[in-house]
Image (cartoon, helix red, strand yellow):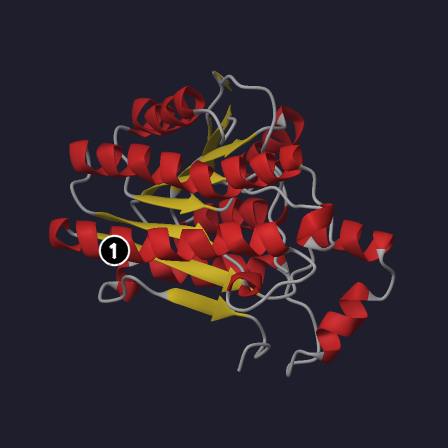
Amino acid sequence: MDNTPGVSGPSGTSATSTTWSAAAPSATAAGLLSGKVAFITGAGRGIGAAAARLFAREGAEVLLAARTEAQLKAVTEEIGAAGGTADYVVCDLADAASVRAAVDRAVQLYGRLDVAFNNGATGQPPGPLDELPEAGFDLVSAVNFKGPWLAMSAEIAAIRATAGRGAIVNTSSVGSLAGNPQLPVYGAAKRAVNSLTESAAVTYGPEGIRVNAVAPGTTLTEMLHAWDERSPGTIEQLNARTPLGRAADPEEIAQAAAWLLSDRASYVTGTVLRVDGGMCA
């Protein structure tokens, strides 16, 4: 039900040589993520792009990663024009070498890694599980489950080697918290991410690395709009199930991720935080 940008695609990685690093405005200096280096997957659109803009406004130096270079470039330039510091790297989340190279790029650019937001994902055509082809199952599993595992493995190594302590947030979904007849494999992959998040929190907490997840409800992203076009009335039906009576703007999800990554959430780890307008209450 959330809707994160699709980042699957041909294997491989490439990086730009341009870093947009205009002087940050004074208001940003005291931001929620001031002084931190942040790595964001799925950052070309939707929640990931909103997070990139927000994290930069909150004082972080940001590296954006996703599959589509044109989208990444546009968001990076927007951040630079607003006075933030950002760069981007093209990355396939299903490819281990691509993910490692993307995380390494953050350290090459900024000298360290403090926080990471593993938001990238790909959707599935809505419908019963027996109607999803095996290739679709493999794609959803590779990007939405294996992808966060690959990313966390690389991020933990980078945090250990540089900042020493840090925080990671994964994007889950309220669709992972109960039966999900319309998005069964997507929901299952996101439920696996919840378990991975909790296990990582227990494993790496003693090192000072916190790991949490956000579980968005209905969120106005490209993925959700595409679903609504295929099945008109979907957004209206989801809103009717939401006590706040509306869908979230992507930045509302990004705000929750920013808080979890910040030092203000210093005693929060192993949590799957619902950001769903009360849908699961």
Residue holding disc 1: 201
Residue type at numbered disc 1: Ala
For the N terminus, the quadrant is: bottom right
Residue in view at x 30 percent, y 36 percent: 153
Answer whether residue 33 is visible to the viewer in this image: no
x and y percent of residue 31 in the render? 37, 56
Above or below — where is 88 with respect to 164? above
Q: Is residue 250 left or right of residue 213?
A: right
Q: Vertical placement of 107 versus 12: above or below?
A: below
Residue at image position (70%, 44%) is 132
Q: Residues within 10 Å of mark 1 (few under 14, many from 20)?
A: many
Is residue 106 or residue 203 the one in the foreground? 203
Q: Residue furthest front?
A: 130
| Residue under the image location 50 percent in, 44 percent down | 52
How many marks overall? 1
On the image, the x and y values in percent for residue 227 come to: 77, 53
Residue 270 relative to residue 14: left or right: left
Residue 222 locus on image (x, y percent): 72, 48
Rendering coords of residue 106 (x, y %): 36, 29
Per the image, label 1 sits on a secondary structure element best described as helix
